[in-house]
Amino acid sequence: MSSRSDGTQTGDGSVPVYFGLGSNLGDRLGNLRCAAAMLGQADGLSQFAVSRVYETEPWGFVDQPPFLNCVVRAHTLLEPEDVLAVTRSVEDALGRERSLRWGPRIIDVDILIFGGLVMDTEDLVIPHPRMWERAFVLVPLMDLAPDMITPDGATLSQKVADLGDAGGVRVFDGDLQGVFDRAENIMM
């Protein structure tokens, strides 16, 4: 089942799509930069912005190195399944292995929000089903959409406060400045 809110479309009919990027193996910042650059080169994605980069403690399986996380916003006319194919091609190109749920990874590229779309299929759930429980997603998302209202009517800052673990999300001394040609890079 799926439904799209026309209120999220821009003048050209495109919708904003938010991606969560994470890495905790190898050159973590370099992995984020490569993934973001590949998104920037993908057909059908445009008008990029990126949050600050945050270092975060692992979630789920905690016996692993800390992650670097950020959120990228783009606009698209593509269908959600086509955007999912883009994210998987980025992960595959960077050597992502899907062996342990919530385990260590070179790169993770998740679709968080796709306009006002609500979708639940075997391959794709939008909004991302656990994003509202994860400070490492919500804190960088606030950089790009500070006034966003969550599906339950709360603000992002209320959601982060309710989680109580935002202290584990720290601004990292490194960013993705210059990754996207003519992109807005949110620097607070």
Image (spheres, rainbow, N blue to C red):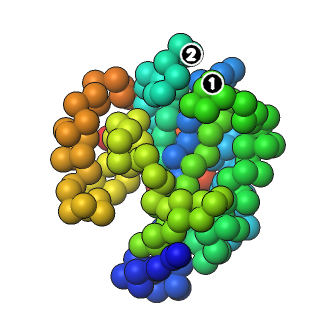
Kind of residue at disc 1: Pro
Residue 18 location (% of width, % of height): 49, 57
Is there a contact, CB below 8 Å, between mark 1 and mark 2? yes
Residue 77 location (% of width, % of height): 61, 77
Q: Secondary structure at mark 2?
A: loop
17 and 126: which one is in front? 126
How far apart are the alpha carbons under marks 1 and 2? Answer: 6 Å
Task: Please state if 19 lies on the left or on the right of 86 as rendered.
Answer: left
Task: Please state if 83 lies on the left or on the right of 22 as rendered.
Answer: right
Residue 143 location (% of width, % of height): 35, 47
Residue pointed to by mark 1: 104
Residue 156 location (% of width, % of height): 26, 51
Kind of residue at disc 2: Gln
Residue pointed to by mark 2: 64
Q: Residue at x 75, y 33 (%)?
A: 97
Q: Residue at x 22, y 31 (%)?
A: 164
37 and 168: which one is in front? 168
Task: Please state if 130 lies on the left or on the right of 75 as rendered.
Answer: left
